Amino acid sequence: MFGHSGSSRSRVALAGALGVGLVFGLAACGGDKDGDSSGSTDSAASSIDCAQFSQFGELKGKTVSVYTGIVTPEDAPHKKSYEPFEKCTGVTVKYEGDKSFETQILVRARAGNPPDLAFVPQPGLLQQLVATGKAVAAPKEVADNTDKWFGKDWKAYGTVDGKFYAAPLGANVKSLVWYSPAEFKDKGYTVPTTLDELKALSDKIAATGSKPWCAGIGSGDATGWPVTDWVEDFMLRLNGVDAYDKWVKHEAPFNSPEDIAAWDAVGSYLKNDKYVNGGLGDVKSIASTTFQDAGLQILEGTCSLHRQASFYAANFPEGTDISENGQIYAFYLPGKDATTKPVLGGGEFVLAFADRPEVKAFQYFLSTDTWANLKAKSSSGWVSANKGLKIENLTNPIDALSAKILQDPNAQFRFDGSDQMPAAVGSNAFWRQATAWITGQDTQTTVNNIEAAWPKK
């Protein structure tokens, strides 16, 4: 159901619970699509600078096809955000959303029938698509925008064998802990800024007789993936980004001392009877509780903390006040010290299979701060790592929090590790062994089994 993608997880969670709010803040993007590149008085075109597209020549009457796994209802604000571009240029954007995108895009590329542009949710899939020989490098205009508006870590994920192919699109933040601001205020708890403070807070809550944490890893065929996120977060925090990168690429074995240290750190929370599983049962109940249901225990008052990604906001009941002073909010899962800011997350990248002027123009548009702010105004539950994204344009407090984390100059972003690993590991052994670990398997056996699953070169 979830595929091998953190972005897929976010789409399922959102589509299943939240829907999409169309609070499009422009005065706006109605009207037809028969504009001209000289600039139009139509409000859609006048909301952006049409002159920026003149560098690509006359584009009126052209069509750009976009293929993506972003489907109804999340596709609506995407399409809406394209209207100023369409009005300015006279280009029609043909959007195709497909739940089977992650398998079908490879089929289409290999068959020589790719779209003009694809929104690719994993660096590993991006590399496979480039390997088909059908993808084209990003134009200089897009590379320049990426240098201007995104960090080097993001550009690196769109680069294959030293050649830059794909600018980032959307993003999600996984390094979050959900909590109740009201409970924290009532009980005098403070948001931790280091791992030591997080442990101290957990001990403080446990000392009251409550179980501080609630967790669930049930997810159908993908059961176990929430544990992999925990492990990845702690690999980053305990060992740093360089060690994390080597681990993901299997330049360091999965049963290395660094890897075992991360599992043991996660175990100090998830396999600690004093800490879990608030309102749900003992440690083993984590495996039988769905990831969607686990954090709801915070509203019940039976647990205080739940580590899950930004997209988890979609799972709280409609009408829940999710804000800094509301019923539910989240804080950044801290690093070893208050200045270290490792961030685990996911996102999509815009990969082209054609280099026609209209395709380049649309790629360029999607890589600008202009589009990021249009998209922010068009929907809830979406954020970008674009440095030009204005926080005030995000209508959702969790989106705003995520953007602040991504824009922190100290942030060191790393993509979800299991999404970059071979499928035999990232969406099989890692998930399965993590589940066995939760239900009683020891750490050494767990990491040895995952190491053994890595494909032999």
Image (cartoon, rainbow, N blue to C red):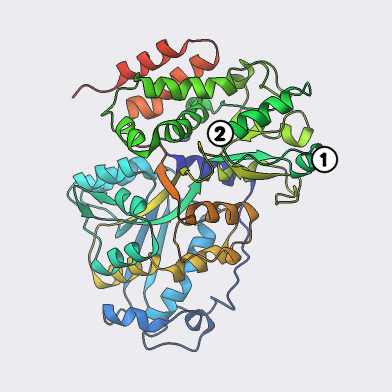
Dot 1 surroundings within 10 Å: few (below 14), some, or many (20 or more)?
few
**Between 35 and 111, the one nearer to me in the picture:** 35
Does residue 327 appear left or right of residue 390 in this picture?
right
Query: Between tags 1 and 2, which lies in front?
Result: 2
Mark 2 burial class by Cα count in 10 Å: few <14, some 14-19, many 20+: some
First in residue order: circle 1 vs circle 2: 1
Name the amino acid type tagged 2. Answer: Leu
Q: Percent position (x, y) of residue 417?
A: 39, 35
Name the residue located 42 percent from the left edge and 83 percent from the top edge. 35
Is 452 above or below relative to 129? above
x and y, in percent, of residue 32 in the image? 48, 79
Q: Which quadrant: the C terminus?
A: top left
Q: Position of residue 49 (x, y in %)?
A: 43, 81
Q: Secondary structure at mark 1?
A: helix
Q: Residue at x 24, y 52 (%)?
A: 113
**Which residue does the numbered mark 1 point to in the structure image?**
186
Q: Nearer the viewer, residue 275 or 199?
A: 199
Above or below for 2 versus 444: below
Q: Mark 1 to mark 2: distance in Å?
A: 23 Å
As drawn, the label of residue 195 is 2
